[in-house]
Amino acid sequence: MSIQVLTVLGSTGSIGVNTLDVVARHPDRFRIFALAGHKQTAKLARQCIQFRPDFAVVADEFAAADLKAILAAEGCPTEVLYGRQALIDVASSDEVDGVMCAIVGAAGLPSALAAAQKGKTIYLANKETLVVAGELFMETARANGARVLPIDSEHNAVFQVLPRDYEAGLDAHGIDSIILTASGGPFLDKDLTEFDSITPEQAVKHPNWSMGQKISVDSATMMNKGLELIEAHWLFACPPDKLEVVIHPQSVVHSMVRYRDGSVLAQLGNPDMRTPIAYCLGLPERISSGVAPLDFETLSALTFRRPDLRRFPCLRLAYEAMNAGGMAPCVLNAANETAVEAFLNKEIRFTDIAPIIAHCLEQKFSDGLNNLESLLAQDGYARKQARDYINGLAK
Ligand code: NAD
Ligand code: MG
């Protein structure tokens, strides 16, 4: 077995930490080439001391000076780089086999795309890459022989139960639909009249999963499932009308595939991201992940129901953006990132998030050239429109 050389982008986040937990269990399989942790220098320093990567990447020169000082004091030889280009460089270096893309938001797109251009194995947690640039990213990966492996638990579940050569087409394999399960988040049964007063602290408390703040708010609005619909659309070349969402509050069935003959295949497991991470990192072998076995004796009932689009208008907006295509998903994502950040900063109410996104989707936007520059320009423009709308709310 040859050692796989990895770059972990977003190593200090929830997915990054789980990735390094799996990597640490298999020192004979993996070597870390680079870690990227933005502004979390103390945490990144501890990871560098443990994994001894060649490079560590942070956001700016201040974070770099900070990290260098800690590493020098510890005698850690890791070289410190900073800035966007450095992320691209460590994602596309000739020395790297695989890149874990676990930065949060559209900020993760340029480095993920760079890895695709260099034909790397891409462990894709950053769903926003596919929402903003699904067509461009998948085309780039295909043209350069980059393998895109889904880390997102639902997509990983689908990937596990699809036939190996699913790329030949879902129809050819007798697949009727892909069913994404959704927990429904912390407000699945909350009185709708109380939604106005939901605080960030309440919104980030997910009932089953421990995740970063942004995706936790997305789960509470169900925008997360909306983003995941668009993610599945591109990953599996699945037409929008063959994508279903089903609420499953226990988060044990991670997603399903419905076949023409009436069979439905599902993947089950405890809600722990180390399972999808280990599945992808180990391919074609199954490797240990540290995840507790699913205990059927203590398992509560598994229940399923239909999502309520009145309770979760963000999910409806995502459906609309997916169906509209073109730049609409890019606008949806940019507006959502801006709104979620404003909500976390207590500038707006929970119930303001959907109207901000709806406002941005109603504006005129470009038909879009399918390249990074025009996508990023549209992203910036939509963020500004969302910002202006938020500033108007405050008056
Ligand atoms: P997180 O907030 O815990 O971590 C984000 C990471 O990105 C951190 O290392 C942070 O330092 C870095 N980062 C933040 N802003 C950055 C920027 N502008 N430039 C470069 N780096 C930056 O987030 P997370 O929960 O680990 O999620 C990461 C990605 O994985 C997201 O796209 C999320 O949707 C996806 N995902 C997460 C989970 C989960 O269980 N946490 C599950 C499925 C998919
Ligand atoms: Mg998911």
Image (spheres, rainbow, N blue to C red):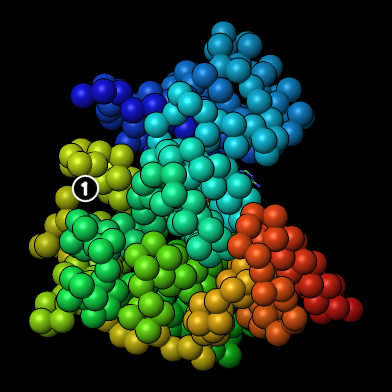
Identify the element where label 1 is drawn.
loop
As drawn, 349 above or below 193: above
Name the spot of residue 328 as percent of width and height, x first. 61, 75
Q: Is residue 228 left or right of residue 379?
A: left
Compared to residue 320, the image places residue 385 above or below, namely above
Q: Which residue is mark 1?
A: 292
Residue 192 falls in image quadrant: bottom right
Q: Quadrant of the N terminus?
A: top left
Residue 46 seen in the current view? no
Q: Mark 1 is on which residue type?
A: Ala
Q: Residue at x 71, y 73 (%)?
A: 366
Q: Is residue 70 left or right of residue 240?
A: right
Q: Please name the residue shown 50% across and 62% down the image.
A: 134
The front one of 70 and 61 is 61
**Of residues 128 and 275, the one drawn nearer to the viewer in this rendering:** 128
From the viewer's side, name the closer residue of 139 and 257: 139
